[in-house]
Amino acid sequence: MENIDIGKKVEKYRKTKDLSIRELAKLAEITPSMLSQIERGLANPSIQTLKTLAKSLDVPTFSFFIEETNTMNLVVRSNSRKKMIIENLSYELVSPDFTGNLAAAIMNFPPNTASSEKLLGHKGEEVAYVLRGKIKVFLNDEEFILESGDSVKIPAHMKHKWENNFDKNAAILFSVTPPAF
């Protein structure tokens, strides 16, 4: 939170409302000089001043404290995905990282491979979508064959595993929340 520039946020909201420093200062009942110092980071506004500025700008007070998201960090190019290989399976991270509440990846299964020897469960809820090929999924004591375009939801802690005992590669897009790998 120490990297948040409240003054820059005040200035951004003021300019969005097409107000001059003098106009906003008058609405907030502070001096134009004080508002200028706040915007330039030379003065720290009191909570009461922030509340008054927020009301004058018609924004919630907490909006001055929200960190900006760098949108460049949200895009993952197909040629620069993070990749991981475990035995014969490869995983490509589709989401930028494992921060937040959701992660997505593509599991690539060559023929005659399995995700594990036995059924495993994890705390995350999972949804998987077959991008290409055919795959067998084991859910507790049952097994299902999924084909391209099919999907499955796997509740948290449900024991499961994946198996490609077919003659073509399979690729499964899955999302899990919270992120667990």
Image (cartoon, grey):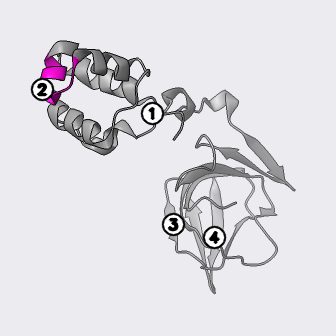
Q: Are the residues at dot 3 and dot 1 in contact (C-beta closer than 8 Å)?
A: no
Earlier in the chain: of badge 4 and badge 2, it is 2
Tag shown at residue 152: 3
Disc 4 + disc 2, Cβ < 8 Å: no
Element class at badge 3: strand
Residue drawn where x is 31% and y is 26% of the image: 10
Q: Which residues are magenta?
A: 23-31
Is the residue marked by circle 4 packed among few (<14), some (14-19), or many (20+) residues within 10 Å? some
Which comes sooner in the sequence, label 2 or label 3?
A: 2
**Residue at mark 4:** 137
Looking at the image, can residue 31 be seen? yes
Q: Amino acid at mark 2?
A: Leu
The secondary element bearing badge 1 is classed as loop
Q: Which sits earlier in the primary sequence, circle 3 or circle 1?
A: 1
Name which of mark 1 and mark 2 comes first in the sequence: 2
- Mark 3–mark 1 Cα distance, whole angstroms, equals 35 Å
Question: How many C-alpha atoms fall within 10 Å of the one at disc 2: few (<14), some, or many (≥20)?
Answer: few
Q: What amino acid is labelled 4 in the image? A: Val
Q: State yes or no: residue 29 in magenta.
A: yes
Residue at 51% in and 41% down: 1
Above or below, comparing residue 106 to residue 39 in the picture: below
In this rendering, is residue 60 above or below 42? below
Question: As rendered, which of 161 and 124 lies closer to the eye?
Answer: 124
Of badges 1 and 2, nearer the viewer stands 2
Residue picked out by circle 1: 68
